[in-house]
Amino acid sequence: MATETSTPDGQTIDFAGLAEKFEEERVKRLRPDANAQYQELGDSALEIDRDPNADPNFQRAPITEEVDVLIIGGGFSGLMTAGRLREKGVADIRIVETGADFGGTWYWNRYPGLQCDAESYVYLPMVEEIGVIPSEKYVKGPEIFTHCQGLAKYYDLYPATLFQTAVTDAQWREDRKRWIVRTSRGDQIAARFVVSGTGFYGSPKLPRIPGMEKFEGHCFHTSRWDYAYTGGTPRGAMTGLKDKVVGIIGTGATAVQVVPHLAESAKHLFVFQRTPSSVAPRDNKPTDPEWAKSLKPDWARERRERYTTFLADLGRFSHEVLLKDGWLEDLPAEGGADDASGAFNTIRLMKEIHDRIDSIVTDKKTAEALKPYYHYFCKRPTFSDDYYPTFNRPDVTLVDTHGKGVEAITAKGLVVDGVEYPLDCLIYSTGFDFLADYARESGITVTGRDGLSLEDYWKEGPRTWFGMMTHNFPNFLFMRLPQTSISFNFVHTADEKARHAAYIISACLQRGGVAVEPSREAESWWIDEVVAKSGPGLAFAAICTPAFYNFEGDESANLTLNGLYGGSSRSYIDQLEAWQQDGTMAGLEMTS
Ligand code: NDP
């Protein structure tokens, strides 16, 4: 029976009724194929896995060389690791990157409306190092891409990088104490150390929808935006769409940014929704030049530290905090997600989103369809001042699939509830293979000591020390998410991991080491720590509607080992720092 409760701000909310409805909606979305409902872009018959920003005719001769450090990936992780290594005097670095430039996520994603979702003063790394002040509180994608290029220039990384090249495999040669790394262009690189920064959004995915290969219109994925077809730029004004009927599948964080721009440009836009996002206010503003002038040296590090510390202890969170942004303002006021007060708040926050929708969207049926019925944070919260008003336009139609997804695709368009929606252009805003296994996410086969494959060693789930190194795979460092912690500003943890990697590599080189790896005991200690801290996260995942966070509700997935470390990012970072301060390389076995 519904229970009404008054909140401290005087609202009356039917908590029990909403919790019941959340559970109904969760169950409605469970599917036996879980993650298998998706395929990687490159595996689909659509042949849309092209890089629209690279020269398709690029050629070069293969190289054979030996380096101290090989970094896989030129996104934030790769850039920061290279920068931190250079700061420690490690000069002999080779970077291998699949794109035609640096940037990673911010190279591939150039869709209209692309914008930073965490405050850019804490999100953009190394701003003080290269003397940059972000132009807005939430900067746009092109500024972040330019920032990545600026970091690469500052640390002189362009000459060290092989672009449009994918690492295919890495094999440890115990006799030489080197990794032999091979690439898609026939290179063979012997490296003392390998750092894998292949990123989280490297594998765009597509749903498997019956008939999708029959579609005769134009189609692409948001991370491969086809401006040659749409016209315009990441700022919008896509003149190529003015006489086109456009459909977009997906309403996640990407779609929330794209949809207002598509609506502006297309003749008509159909938004195909399976589960609505929560969309809170964006409230962006340009950086105040007076404030920028007032910043003292070390401001960026201090601000970032403060942000992470506030997030570490949600119980202490206050709306009066000096440092505010959409994430902080939307955090639960108290309690963890696993207890009653946490559930209370994740319902209250969602009720606020419902009220926001009612105050903006005029058509009642559309407003109801846009309301998310799940606990806040079950899916990635999003922020926009333009998304909900877009649904008041006469040239925009929301097609709600009531949690079922698009039924079929025909030569002409999409089918939902037996109704065909003819389209000229279909855009897949269907996300990325997130927290997938290493081989799948990176496309790299890794073979450690005695021919042991990483896939075999991690058969029951990853086994790592701090999520970064693994026994039997000396001198190989991962910049992945599983078994590490992130705050809403993932770049902070990524930078700390980059510093950690740079510390381990430079210490090993300085101390005359040739190989370093975690002991079996150190690895087990971290696994135990990961398991011990997994309770609240697992409990929350279990009450959440299917999403990539909980492996689409797949109970057989090893969410404990494949998921994030359940301690706070503050505690994770503090542990890394304390380990470095200790200076004894505790837990690592070094061969001299
Ligand atoms: P998501 O995985 O979040 O969204 C995919 C969307 O496709 C969902 O709405 C999903 O519905 C829908 N979908 C999947 N299959 C079907 C189907 N068969 N029929 C209809 N709909 C379907 O991908 P995004 O690209 O939006 O975001 C991925 C991540 O990228 C974010 O979580 C965020 O971490 C990051 N990001 C960051 C940004 C930033 O910081 N500025 C901006 C944008 C993205 P359902 O929910 O039901 O599964």
Image (spheres, rainbow, N blue to C red):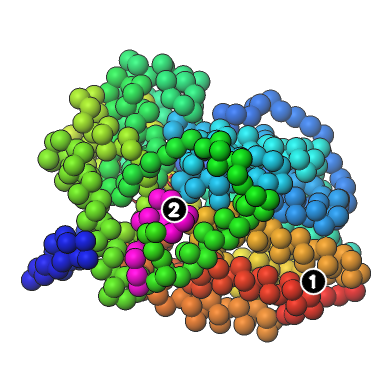
Q: Quadrant of residue 509?
A: bottom right
Residue beneath the point at 28% across and 65% down: 345
Per the image, is 325 magenta? yes
Residue beneath the point at 63% across and 56% down: 301
Nearer to us in this view, 147 or 405:
147
**Mark 1 highlights which residue?**
516
Instruction: Work out whether 177 lies above or below 548.
Output: below
Counting from the top left corner in percent of width and height, residue 475 is at 77, 65
Residue beneath the point at 37% across and 28% down: 261
Name the mark on residue 324. 2
Q: Is residue 355 left or right of residue 107?
A: left
Label 2 CA crowd tier, 10 Å (few <14, some 14–19, many 20+): some
Residue 126 in view: no
Element at badge 1? Answer: strand
In magenta, the rendered stretch is 321-335
Q: Amino acid at mark 1?
A: Val
Q: Amino acid at mark 2?
A: Lys
Q: Quadrant of residue 185?
A: top right
Residue 206 in view: yes
